[in-house]
């Protein structure tokens, strides 16, 4: 099969891109998703708040997923769920598996929009026994909202960012008694209003500066050994469910198989401000390049990528300028996009996204190139929450000079 | 054998690990009524499932030992059996790497030992040759020995294939039946188990970590004591697989083979094991210290591992004893065989052990009459390896049955068809752990983030309630 654009992933980024590509007159747009239904992660996130920035309205996760799937189909994109891109025979020649069989697709351009996942307990190297009852938020939400499972008994949530509070709500909905949210940070990282409301409604405390040292239970979960990072003291907390939340990692395997460069900060494919990776005509958007942002930000990134894909496919594209990497230093953990061309267009929403590993109330960011300060900006840093940086400095970068680095003054 | 009353067996085998299953499979071709008894809910859930998944040549066994002999024989038999039964095996070869001058000086002795063990295809490799073969190897390696026939194998399919073959030949597996007492009188062994009483003429003790306790029930004990040695292992993401071609072995220290890095047949890299003596025979928990030590060692062997994700960590217990060799003996007067002390080489040696035990039993008076009819041969097991064609890659198979095109577990690319087949197999899984070992479902990098809920619902649909099977 031949298509103009193959989109891997029918979540918010992939579907928003498909709609925009069709609106811009791109002919054959094929969106494939390995899940049985299109829509991505919002499908099993029952709470509201979806669609704020991209659709200018507020919807539930499943409603939002349905809206995008219908709109993409109505726009003339072909959507195939239950279809996995299993690899690449050449940079834009994909192999697919579905119930219809094994096939190949040649695409003039590819958009990778495979999203991200939470790192499970094993990847976090939490030692101890391996009983059932230990899961990620993704698994929890599918069990509760897609299969209607009940989870009676005590539950502990590891993490205290937005998704952790979401896990807490899901657990409460499933009949669990949530004992606490645990974070190794010195305070919770969600919005204060959300955290306070949750604490007031469900009376769930956040245990800060606390880490899981060991999981205990043979055959079934008995509980977790927790350490107070300030005193070093440990204590055993019995529980029947243990949910590891957040700690996102892009699902970058298809990108790596395609040979794209990987950014060491985001661990997703490195992309320039047009969302193009190091492999020409292979683009990436959504939580694959910034794990994890809200669905609307992923959708807007997909829409932005679509405009540049459509432009690239219109032909007469000049040779690509060399990519200038954009890096960060600690406590900043990543920046997205993480490469620029000079001159080059601004990124999605006209700004770069960053993450920090530490709290700073009044941080001063500096954009430097070879010791030269290109820009400064003020920001409030909270781990797990987005930090924004304008793009006005891009014009001041020197194409032939060293990498651009964003540092904390 | 004729004349055995109903509800009894000619032979009872205690232990459904790889050794017990291999013995059951080997004895199944004779006219015997056989029952395999195990406390767990599946075959291969003890030492069998948590090891380094290497099919050893036995090059570094103690020359002249029974282990050396049975390893060599068993390895050859398993290579042949695996090819017929569809058990994934890859002959990656191994490099025994010397990092210090002391280790380098030990290499000629190890080469000589391999020859004494009857393994001659061993040879030295220079540092330059080593780095050419394994360019991602960390700096400082001085020299190596190459053992070209060391292989990797699927430790889950192997006992399942033995058990499947045995069951199809009439062997009964009585699981969830932990043996708590054994009494002998009037020519019968009576086994009291948590799942009912079992009576048999002959008894084979292949109880692994519990072999000394069973031995004590028969014979007063004291001949050997199982001293569980815990080995922790780390499985790295498939993205790390290109970092390594062969198994990298350390120069053996006094107690164990040390920390190795090996590919797995599932396309991961495995790092381990630690070696820690523990008291508790069920303590398969990992420890912070053990995992940290492994990561430390792994990153000096393959520095690029530091940038790769960990998919799983686990620990297994080897059934070590105070003796250096296997503890196998047959007591004709008791109609009893003890197959103990099969430390960390049971998977590789299993068919050699089974053949040896069968011979010993025949010599002790167990009547072995071949069954009539044609031998159906090994079952063809679902293929779990990366070296061959998996169902999701097989256009013809999907065309015949679209279930093999519906990928359910995305990380391991396990299809609905494979899960459905496992749930309807000769020996179906009793829980999700059993399904993991039969299909690889949920064993990947997301550890269930995407598929655990779907897999659970497929299992629930196949079995009305937990514990009903």
Image (cartoon, grey):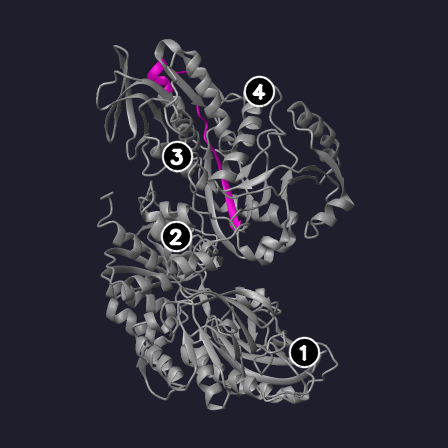
- Labels 2 and 4 in the same subunit: yes
- Find the magenta span and give its range: B215-235
Q: Chain of mark 1?
A: A
Vertical side of A215 occupied by A371: above or below: below
Task: Look at mark 4 in the image and give the residue it sits on.
Answer: B65
Q: Are marks 2 and 1 on the same chain?
A: no
Count neighbours of disc 4 (C-alpha within 10 A) and say few if under 14, some if 14 to 19, many if 20 or more.
some
Residue indicated by mark 2: B418
Residue B348 position (above or below residue B302): above
Which residue position holds label 1? Answer: A324
Going from the N terminus, do you reach mark 3 or mark 4 first? 4
How many residues crowd around disc 1 within 10 Å: few (fewer than 14), some, or many (20 or more)? Answer: many
Nearer to the camera, A185 or B456:
B456
Residue A409 visible here: no
Label 1, label 4: how far apart the Cα atoms are: 63 Å
> What is the quadrant of residue B200 in the picture?
top left
Q: Are marks 3 and 4 on the same chain?
A: yes
Q: Quadrant of the N terminus of chain B?
A: top left
Circle 2 or circle 1, nearest the eye: 2
Question: Is residue B348 magenta-colored?
Answer: no
Q: Residue A255 appears in which quarter of the rendering? A: bottom right
Chain of the residue on which disc 4 is drawn:
B
Quadrant of the image for the C terminus of chain B? top left
Are the residues tagged 2 and 4 within 8 Å (C-beta)?
no
Tell me residue B178's x, y (percent): 30, 30
Residue B261, image x, y percentages: 59, 44
Task: Residue B243 in the image: state x and y as whole percent.
Answer: 63, 53
Residue at the location (42% across, 60% down)? B399
Residue at the disc numbered 3: B165
Picture residue at 33% right of the left edge, 87% below the top = A57
C-alpha gap between disc 3 and disc 2: 19 Å
Cα–Cα gap, marks 2 and 1 = 47 Å
């Amino acid at each position: 099969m031949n298509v103009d654009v193959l989109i891997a992933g029918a979540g918010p980024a992939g579907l928003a891109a498909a709609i925009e590509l069709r609106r811009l007159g791109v002919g054959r747009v094929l969106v494939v998703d390995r899940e049985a239904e299109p829509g991505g992660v919002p499908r099993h996130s029952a709470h509201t708040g979806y669609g704020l920035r991209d659709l200018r309205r507020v919807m539930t996760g499943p409603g939002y997923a349905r809206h995008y799937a219908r709109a993409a189909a109505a726009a003339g994109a072909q959507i195939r769920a239950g279809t996995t891109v299993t690899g690449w025979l050449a940079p834009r020649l994909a192999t697919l598996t579905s119930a219809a069989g094994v096939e190949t697709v040649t695409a003039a351009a590819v958009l990778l929009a495979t999203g991200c996942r939470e790192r499970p307990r094993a990847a976090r190297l939490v030692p101890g026994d391996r009983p059932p009852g230990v899961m990620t938020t993704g698994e929890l939400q599918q069990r509760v909202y897609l299969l209607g499972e009940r989870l009676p008994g005590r539950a502990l949530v590891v993490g205290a960012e937005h998704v952790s509070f979401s896990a807490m709500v899901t657990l409460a909905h499933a009949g669990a008694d949530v004992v606490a949210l645990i974070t190794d940070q010195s305070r919770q990282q969600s919005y204060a209003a959300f955290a306070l409301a949750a604490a007031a409604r469900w009376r769930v405390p956040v245990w800060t500066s606390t880490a899981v040292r060991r999981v205990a239970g043979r055959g079934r979960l008995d509980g977790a050994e927790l350490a107070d990072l300030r005193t070093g003291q440990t204590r055993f907390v019995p529980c029947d469910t243990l949910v590891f939340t957040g700690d996102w990692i892009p699902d970058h395997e298809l990108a790596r198989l395609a040979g794209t460069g990987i950014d060491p900060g985001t661990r997703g494919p490195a992309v320039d401000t047009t969302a193009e990776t190091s492999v020409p005509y292979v683009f990436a958007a959504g939580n694959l390049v910034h794990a994890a942002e809200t669905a609307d930000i992923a959708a807007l990134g997909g829409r932005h990528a679509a405009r540049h894909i459509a432009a690239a496919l219109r032909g007469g594209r000049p040779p690509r300028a060399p990519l200038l990497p954009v890096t960060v230093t600690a406590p900043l953990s990543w920046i997205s996009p993480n490469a620029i061309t000079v001159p080059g267009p601004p990124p999605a929403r006209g700004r770069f996204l960053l993450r920090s590993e530490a709290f700073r109330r009044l941080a001063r960011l500096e954009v430097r190139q070879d010791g030269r300060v290109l820009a400064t900006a003020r920001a409030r840093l909270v781990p797990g929450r987005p930090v924004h940086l304008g793009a006005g400095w891009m014009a001041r970068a020197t194409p032939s000079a060293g990498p651009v680095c964003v540092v904390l003054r | 054998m004729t004349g055995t009353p109903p509800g009894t067996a000619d032979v009872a085998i205690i232990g459904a690990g790889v050794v017990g299953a291999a013995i059951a499979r080997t004895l199944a071709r004779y006219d015997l009524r056989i029952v395999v008894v195990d406390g767990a809910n599946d075959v291969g859930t003890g030492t069998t499932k948590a090891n380094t998944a290497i099919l050893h040549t036995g090059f570094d066994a103690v020359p002249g030992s029974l282990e050396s002999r049975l390893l060599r024989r068993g390895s050859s038999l398993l290579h042949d059996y695996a090819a017929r039964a569809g058990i994934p095996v890859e002959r990656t070869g191994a490099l025994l790497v010397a990092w210090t001058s002391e280790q380098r000086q030990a290499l000629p002795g190890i080469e000589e030992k391999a020859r004494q063990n009857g393994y001659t295809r061993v040879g030295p490799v220079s540092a330059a040759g080593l780095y050419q073969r394994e360019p991602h190897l960390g700096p400082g390696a001085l020299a190596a020995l190459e053992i070209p026939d060391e292989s990797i194998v699927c430790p889950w399919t192997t006992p399942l294939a033995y058990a499947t073959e045995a069951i199809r030949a009439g062997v009964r597996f009585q699981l969830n039946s932990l043996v708590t007492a054994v009494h002998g009188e009037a020519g019968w062994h009576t086994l009291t188990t948590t799942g009912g009483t079992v009576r048999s003429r002959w008894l084979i003790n292949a109880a692994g970590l519990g072999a000394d306790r069973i031995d004590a029930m028969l014979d007063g004990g004291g001949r050997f004591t199982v001293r569980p040695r815990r080995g922790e292992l780390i499985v790295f993401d498939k993205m790390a697989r290109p970092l390594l071609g062969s198994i990298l072995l350390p120069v053996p220290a006094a107690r164990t083979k040390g920390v190795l890095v090996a590919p797995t047949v599932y396309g991961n890299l495995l790092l381990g094991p630690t070696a820690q003596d523990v008291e508790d025979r069920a303590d398969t928990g990992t420890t912070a210290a053990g995992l940290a030590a492994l990561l430390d060692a792994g990153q000096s062997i393959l520095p690029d591992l530091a940038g790769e994700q960990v998919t799983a960590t686990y620990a297994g217990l080897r059934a070590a004893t105070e003796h250096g060799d296997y503890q196998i003996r047959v007591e004709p007067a008791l109609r009893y065989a003890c197959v103990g002390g099969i430390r960390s080489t049971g998977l590789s040696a299993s068919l050699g052990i089974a053949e040896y035990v069968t011979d010993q039993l025949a010599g002790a008076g167990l009547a072995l009459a071949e069954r009539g009819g044609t031998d159906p041969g090994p079952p063809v097991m679902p293929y779990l390896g990366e070296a061959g064609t998996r169902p999701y890659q097989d256009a013809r198979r999907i065309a015949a049955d679209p279930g093999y095109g519906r990928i359910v577990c995305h990380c391991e690319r396990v299809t609905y068809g494979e899960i459905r087949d496992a749930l309807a197999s000769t020996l179906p899984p009793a829980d999700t752990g059993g399904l993991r070992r039969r299909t690889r479902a949920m064993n990947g990098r997301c550890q269930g983030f995407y598929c655990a809920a779907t897999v659970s619902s497929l299992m629930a649909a196949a079995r009305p309630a937990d514990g009903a099977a």
